[in-house]
Image: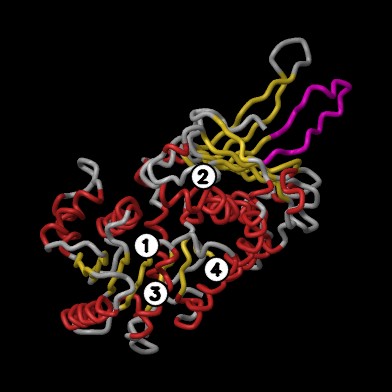
Amino acid sequence: MIDKNHKEAAPTIFIIFGITGDLAGRKLLPALLALYSRRMLPKEFSIIGISRRIWTREDFRQFIREHIKIRPGQYKEEDVKHFIDHIEYEQGLFDSALLYESLKSRIANIENRFKRCCNKLFHLSVPSNHCEPILKNLSELKLHEECSDELGWTRVLVEKPFGNDIDTAIRLDKLLASLFREEQIFRIDHYLAKEALQNILTFRFANSLFEPLWNHNFIDRVHIRLLEKNDVSGRATFYDSVGALKDVGQNHLLQMLALTAMEEPNDFNPENIRKERARVLKNLEPFPTRNLKEAVVRAQYKGYENEKGVAPASQTETYFLLKTFINNQRWANVPFFLESGRALKEAKTEICIYFKDQNTSSKKSEKRENVLVFRIQPDEGIKIRFWVKTPGFPMLIEPKTLSFKYSDIGTEDAIPDAYEKLIHDAIWGDQTLFASTDEVIYAWKYITPIIRSWGTVTLLEYPKGSMGPIE
């Protein structure tokens, strides 16, 4: 259960490792500012940003203002100024003990100012290779410890990717477990917090119309797409060391699959929901690694090797398509296709449920599939394709679409950003939208054999602005 007792009213310190990074500028700081403007942060709070850059206080404040990229008229100027007033800067290297001694002193000063022990939320907005030295140094100076059983909780948020393969994921998980209890650990996959993705469970279990059809007797296949128009410019060095499958396949796409395929939990508390998601990932049918090319397409867009930061003759994939199955009774023999790519014709994230063709007429060549589409982004909503008779004397059938869009029921600002929800839930201790240990480990157990066998699959090529390789 979520603990919303008097501890949550305590002053809270947000410690962000990697405050000058891309993620902090695009997501974390805008989310905190949005929560502040909605008066959804603790009344007393402070933000400590940590980075290796050397700055004066004024230089840092100016950087933060520019880094957040506030739209004209988005917030009251007074709110922006007061929010930035809550941010302090700590300079240092993540593996330097001096940084953590200075951080401990700064936290003590803030607690003296608030005249009580504070909640502490450590956000590791850094590549996974920095997590281990940060956690070990926090432990050395006992910064991870809570003040008492009643006051001043400590929690840690860890960004994806959680490790680089099954071995590094297990090592990182063991380190976290040695410092924190499971209820203190919040592993971020921000797709879980997207409004349209959360609505899948409501749509399934609150509408008796669909749940009886949610199985292999009625569903032919499921196609999950995360397509992007942007190439890797600006983050090519990072991307070339990771590739599309690790970047979004091991986390975003598998989490969307788990939400789509999970069983209804006994009740909708965080623990049960996460158990059901993990059970799906555990039951994924292992890939035939000896003949991987029958179930996988991997490709790279033309000109990728010319991107600044990409290694010569790089074999990193910018596109993949996987065909997988879930080994349980509900989904027997139903293929799930997971597809993602960069530099494609369009940008969209969606889950398409293709129902079996019930056409019993003699014209079997006339395919009549019902299709249910959950559009995650952009234009969040739900569409259903169904078939009706064309007006007139002949008995002709044509497809129509029934649709719902979130933009039809409110302004765009009414839908909170995923990171707003994640930070808000972390403050309240709600782990529903965060990956559990089991989810992370099962996902890596599934993906790691594919990564280790990538070399057996031909790397195809596709032009930028296309829909990917022909295959």
- Which of the labelled discs sits on residue 341, or is there none? none
- Three-letter amino acid code at disc 1? Ser
Instruction: Determine whether, in the image, residue 56 is placed left or right of residue 303.
Output: left
Q: What's the residue at 76%, 41% (across, down)?
A: 220
Location of residue 261 (image quadrant): bottom right
Of badges 3 and 4, nearer the viewer stands 3
Q: What's the residue at 78%, 58% (across, down)?
A: 328
- Residue wearing tag 4: 169
Residue at mark 2 to residue at mark 4: CA–CA distance: 25 Å
Q: Does the magenta segment cover residue 368?
A: yes
Is the Cβ of the residue at disc 2 closer than 8 Å to that at disc 4?
Answer: no
Of badges 1 and 4, nearer the viewer stands 4
- Three-letter amino acid code at disc 4? Ala
Residue at mark 1 to residue at mark 4: CA–CA distance: 17 Å
- Residue wearing tag 2: 314
Is the Cβ of the residue at disc 3 closer than 8 Å to that at disc 1?
Answer: no
- Three-letter amino acid code at disc 3? Pro
Residue at mark 2 to residue at mark 1: CA–CA distance: 27 Å
What number of labels is visible? 4
Q: Position of residue 240 (x, y in %)?
A: 47, 49
Residue 147's place in the image compared with 263, above or below, is: below
- Residue wearing tag 3: 133
Of badges 3 and 1, nearer the viewer stands 3
Q: Nearer the viewer, residue 390 or 186?
A: 186
Q: What span is in magenta?
A: 353-370
Residue at mark 3 to residue at mark 1: CA–CA distance: 14 Å
